[in-house]
Amino acid sequence: MSVKETVALGQLNYMHNYAQFPISFSSGEGCYLIDEDGNRYLDCVAGIAVNDLGYGNDEVAKVLKDQIDTGLLHCSNLYYNANSVKAAVMLNKLAGSSEVFFCNSGTEANEAALKMARKYGSAKGKYKIISMEHSFHGRTYGSITVTGQEKYHKGFAPMLPGVLYATFNDLESVENLVDDETCAIIVEPLQGEGGIVPAKQEFLSGLRALCDEKDIVLIFDEVQCGLGRTGRPFCFQHYGVKPDILTLAKAIGCGVPMGATLAFERVKGTFAPGDHAATFGGNLLATAASQVILSKLADRDFLEDIALRSSYLEKKLDEIVAAHPDKCIERRGMGFMQGIDLKVAPRDVVSACMEKGLLVCSAGYTVLRFVPPLVISREEIDRACSIVEESLSSL
Ligand SMILES: Cc1ncc(COP(=O)(O)O)c(C=O)c1O
């Protein structure tokens, strides 16, 4: 089909829950996506921080083909399977966690985390959860409730009871909400959808101390910022602050849907048989693919290379901000999760870049977001930045 045909059929047959651009892709190569009419786009969206290894990665293709050849794509969690066991071992080693629950998405990973925290607190009558303003945790009812943005709640009330919202990076605002019924605090160490805002060191350290003192479960949502995106396996490792529960998804399946909830020592053993489940959790295809990215995250050279190339991206974005003070406020972010806070509408910049063959996306109302594949080269960073520069100049 052509782009035009696919878009027309999509508009007729899809629910209209996305503000979609009139474009459809049919293949990918490295950091490029190719649309159905054969046009190539340099991709700094990567499926929104999913396609860490770019497109057409040979190792991912091989493990998926090998798994297909076994004839076994799915197996119930009534039984064990070696792929998901290996992925769990790798995750526990990388994160320092004790136990893993597998699911299919970020929102499910957070639902498991919230349930686990409530179960942990239930013996002491604790049920309240504190989350942050401008956070994003997903679209199912638990996750949407702890998402501290009114726009996502509108029309869907009532939300889950017992959730309170503090100010991100303001420890006192959290302390003011804590009481004897608080069971959990959930936070993104680097806020994504809220506008690419890193946590301050003293904020995360303060949350850890508060949770230790009051026996509160600290949940880090690294669905977007985890898995190498910031140059370490997990974003929390930059801060030296460990959570009690870590949630992951997006990049973990190398493009195959997958999520994971990791329990650390304090909450180990909270879930008993029957407490939680996901039919497709630990799916053999997903957990085969995940071992490719997880083994790379154990490789120091891979991570150092991300740190070098992402600091090059930071430098180039800083130059863009300095050259356009009328349109840009500042650059924020860590590693390959970067944003430019704009004075103009991000969607206009996104559209102008798309016309020139570059995919970028927005975050929040004002931020232009860059979450490219972690394998993007310096030359590709140069090309992306010169297109952003031209697009800003043209507005
Ligand atoms: C930090 C964070 N948590 C959770 C989610 C939800 O993930 P999913 O769309 O896989 O449910 C997202 C998605 O953007 C996210 O950025």
Image: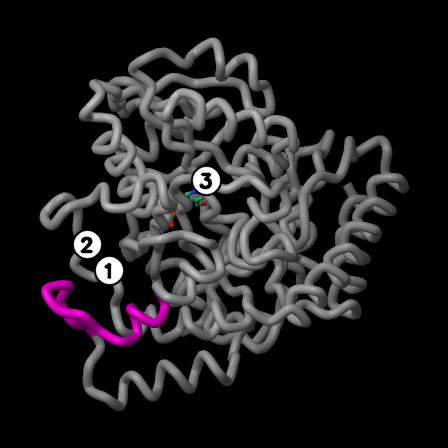
| Secondary element at image label 3 | loop
- Outermost residue toward the right? 323
Displayed quadrant of residue 239: top right
**In the rendered image of this protein, does residue 221 appear above or below residue 123?**
below
Which label sits on residue 243?
3
Q: Quadrant of the N terminus?
A: bottom left
| Image quarter for ligand 1 | top left
Q: Quadrant of the C terminus?
A: top right
Mark 3 and mark 2 in contact (Cβ < 8 Å)?
Answer: no
Residue 173 location (% of width, % of height)? 53, 13
Mark 3 and mark 1 in contact (Cβ < 8 Å)?
Answer: no
- Tag 1 residue: 281
| 3D distance between C-alphas at marks 1 and 2 | 5 Å
Mark 2 residue crowding within 10 angstroms, few (<14) / some (14–19) / many (20+):
some
Q: Is residue 88 magenta?
A: no
Marked residue nearer the N-terminal end (2 or 3): 3
Residue 121 location (% of width, % of height)? 25, 27
| Secondary element at image label 2 | loop
Q: Look at 78% across and 50% down and name the residue there.
A: 314
At label 2, which amino acid type do we have? Ala
Q: Look at 44% across and 27% down and name the residue there.
A: 212
Which label sits on residue 278?
2
**In the rendered image of this protein, does residue 354 appear above or below residue 53?**
above
Q: Which residues are magenta?
A: 74-87
Q: Relative to the observer, which residue lies in front, 207 or 362? A: 207
At label 3, which amino acid type do we have? Pro
**In the rendered image of this protein, does residue 77 appear above or below residue 58?**
above
Q: Is residue 273 visible?
A: yes
